[in-house]
Image (cartoon, rainbow, N blue to C red):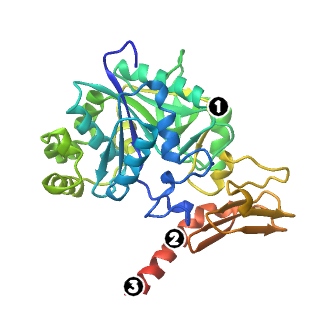
Amino acid sequence: MSGNSIKVVPVIMAGGAGTRLWPLSREEKPKQFHDLSGEGTLLEQTIKRLLPLHPESCVIVTARSYEEASYAELGRIGIKGTVLSEPRPRNTAAAVLYAAAYLSRIYTDSVMVVLPADHHIRKPDEFADVLRLAVAEALKGNLATIGVKPLYPETGYGYIKASPGTGDAFPVDSFVEKPDLATARRYLEEGSYYWNSGIYAWKTSVILDRFARYLPRHHDAFGPLFALDTADIASSTGKAWEIKRSVFDAVESISIDYGIMEKTDGRMVVPGDFGWGDLGSWNSIDDILPADAEGNRSPSGQRAIFVGARDCSVFAEDKRIAVVGLSNVVVVQSGGDILVMEKDASQRVREVVDIVRSLDSGGRS
């Protein structure tokens, strides 16, 4: 950012398989590499909305099998970046430490803006303003997290409770788990609770200090990585890759919230209202698609036909789908698989994925 010698580096978490968006999102091509809105892939949109920060480069943390696709996204946008491949998924704490180890070998210090690749932001200009406020908090030595002003009593998100204060950022009182409906309603009424967006900003030096303090086993396990040069830390071949495999084998799967943010001092929440959506299920996709007069939605153009249907959504990869006389249904076609789902059952798609994996593994044996 102009006016500061310290570099701001976006760190994008793009390793999830997104199984709740099956069959479109699957392990060989997860949701972050799909265009769900007609405006570019989720990863592409995530990178583009970070450009107002004028980053010198960005870091994408993902699985080895998505490294090539991630570099292709960077190339299409025209921004320099490094893809750090994880030998195995170990949740967000390990991903953050991996990126911090890499950045600590490039800069004396830097500000990491950490965010997932599967969010939708309807107001990118407002989002950029909130990110700048979070970076300003990080430059003070704080660990900033972005809290989304809740619009309704949502039970599917974790919440951040803010302490009283003035200005653009507030001390964090606590992180709270996903509530039941009555509790979510109370949070909405009280006004000091925000949806936990999973977006952070902190100095690399500060987060490394917190790892040493609160997750020392992670910090110690990653020691061999800090001894490598930057090219080896970013390598997914040879001896460097074997070192990284042993590092990731040695750490348990812990989120950055549970491992550090719920315990540390210096936490600040920056509230924002920028049309945020966490695209974790087919039900949530409705938030990013315009509806016709009957509430039907589709990015598939003439491949989607609605007759006497209301509040239905269709995602057709390469086949034509007609929905007749139904309401509140999602139909998804990808490859040879078709999902037909009542919208309110979107959290059960994982059960389908488990069954499909079992059938597929049985078929190969």
Looking at the rendered structure, the kind of residue marked 1 is Glu
Question: How many numbered marks are there?
Answer: 3
Q: Position of residue 325 (x, y in %)?
A: 85, 68
Mark toward the start of the polypeptide (1 vs 3): 1
Query: Is disc 1 placed on a helix, strand or loop?
Result: helix
Q: Please name the amino acid that badge 3 sits on.
A: Arg
Give the mark, 1 or 2, whose residue is nearer the N terminus: 1
Cα–Cα gap, marks 3 and 2? 17 Å
SS at badge 3: helix
Q: Nearer the viewer, mark 1 or mark 3?
A: 3
Residue at 78% x, 57% y is 311
Q: Residue drawn 59% across and 66% down?
A: 348
Residue under numbered circle 2: 353
Lower position in the chain sequence, tag 3 or tag 2: 2
Q: Is residue 303 above or below residue 38?
A: below
**Residue beneath disc 1:** 190
Q: Which residue matches tag 3?
A: 364
Specify the quadrant of the image occupied by residue 13.
top left
Cα–Cα gap, marks 1 and 3: 55 Å
SS of the residue at dot 2?
A: helix
Percent position (x, y) of residue 353?
51, 70
The answer to whether residue 365 is visible is: yes
69 to the left or right of 244: right
User: Does the residue at mark 3 contact the one at mark 2 (Cβ under 8 Å)?
Assistant: no
